[in-house]
Amino acid sequence: MMKNKFIVIEGLEGAGKTHACLFVKETLKEYNIRNVVLVRQPGSTPIAEKIRKLIKNEFQIEKFEKETELLLMYAARIQLVKKIIQPALKQGKWVISDRHDLSSFAYQGGGLGIKKKLIQQLTSLFLGDLMPDLTLYLDVHPKIGLKRALKRKKLDRIEHRSLKFFKKTRISYLKNIKSDKKVIKIDANLNINSVTQNIKFQILKWLHKKVI
Ligand code: T5A
């Protein structure tokens, strides 16, 4: 039997991550993998959800420092990792996470300009050897992604940032995944059926490799 895995879905707003997480869960079912925990970052524990609200809301009287934003992302992540992800993995469950630390490298690193080395230090200090077994990076042009996100909901504090910010964030994603063999890039600019079919193809190929 295949050992349980930690799968992460990454990408800009409107890339289709929420949809992809549910679809990956369904695809795993076809392999008779039913013991799956689905989480989102920041969030998924009571404290992490409070931090999520704090991060997403605009404050009229005070601006977030970029380091504050980064540390809040890690605070939420630590709660989630310790309270849900690590226990689930220990119990043999599979975990699918809508975003993980690659988001911090892309948004706070690439987008806001915080040094990569500092984020790497936070990751090794607080996440230790927890690493995704597979990351699906849904690559979408910021204009397309933001248009989709806007159709669905009111934009939050981060989503209100400039197109330049999201372009830098995307470049950072692409740089960071370049030589990572555990990341699969999916073209998320295509229509939802094509994206879904590609996700299915990639997941089945990956699962097949793990079995043989
Ligand atoms: N953040 C997070 C950081 O800055 N640093 C960090 O370390 C972390 C963890 C989270 C915010 O926090 C930031 C990033 C974010 O700004 P959020 O609301 O969770 O906030 O933001 P997102 O995760 O980006 O959520 P979105 O809902 O905006 O994006 P999704 O989940 O990628 O998109 P989804 O699936 O909800 O789809 C959006 C809409 O587009 C349609 C869907 O049907 C839906 O209506 N859609 C498509 N339409 C056409 N073609 C396709 N291929 C489509 N795919 C989806």
Image: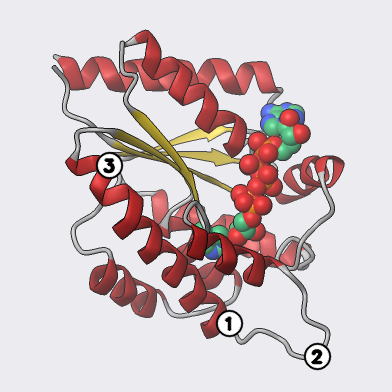
Q: Are marks 1 and 3 in contact (CB under 8 Å)?
A: no
Is 38 on the left-hand or right-hand side of 207? right
Q: Amino acid at mark 1?
A: Lys
Identify which residue is drawn at 77% across, 81% down.
59
Task: Find residue 66 and name its label.
Answer: 1
The CA distance from mark 3 to mark 2 is 40 Å
Residue 88's place in the image compared with 166, above or below, is above
The label shown at residue 166 is none
Looking at the rendered structure, the secondary structure element under dot 1 is helix
Question: Of the residues shown, which amino acid type is indicated by label 2?
Answer: Ile
The amino acid type, in three-letter code, at marker 3 is: Ala
Label 2: element kind:
loop
Badge 2 density bin: few <14, some 14–19, many ≥20, Cα 10 Å: few
For the point 82% across and 47% down, the residue is 153
Question: Which badge, 3 or 2, comes first in the chain's sequence?
Answer: 2
Which residue appears at 23% of the width and 54% of the height? 130
Vertical comparison of 199 with 40: above or below: above
Comes first in the chain, label 1 or label 2: 2
Residue 14 position by quadrant: top right
Residue 140 point in image, percent of width and height: 65, 42
Residue 164 position, x and y percent, is 73, 66
Distance between the alpha carbons at the discs numbered 1 and 3: 31 Å
Q: Which residue is mark 2?
A: 61
Q: Report which residue position mark 3 lands on.
A: 88
Left or right: 47 in relation to 62: left
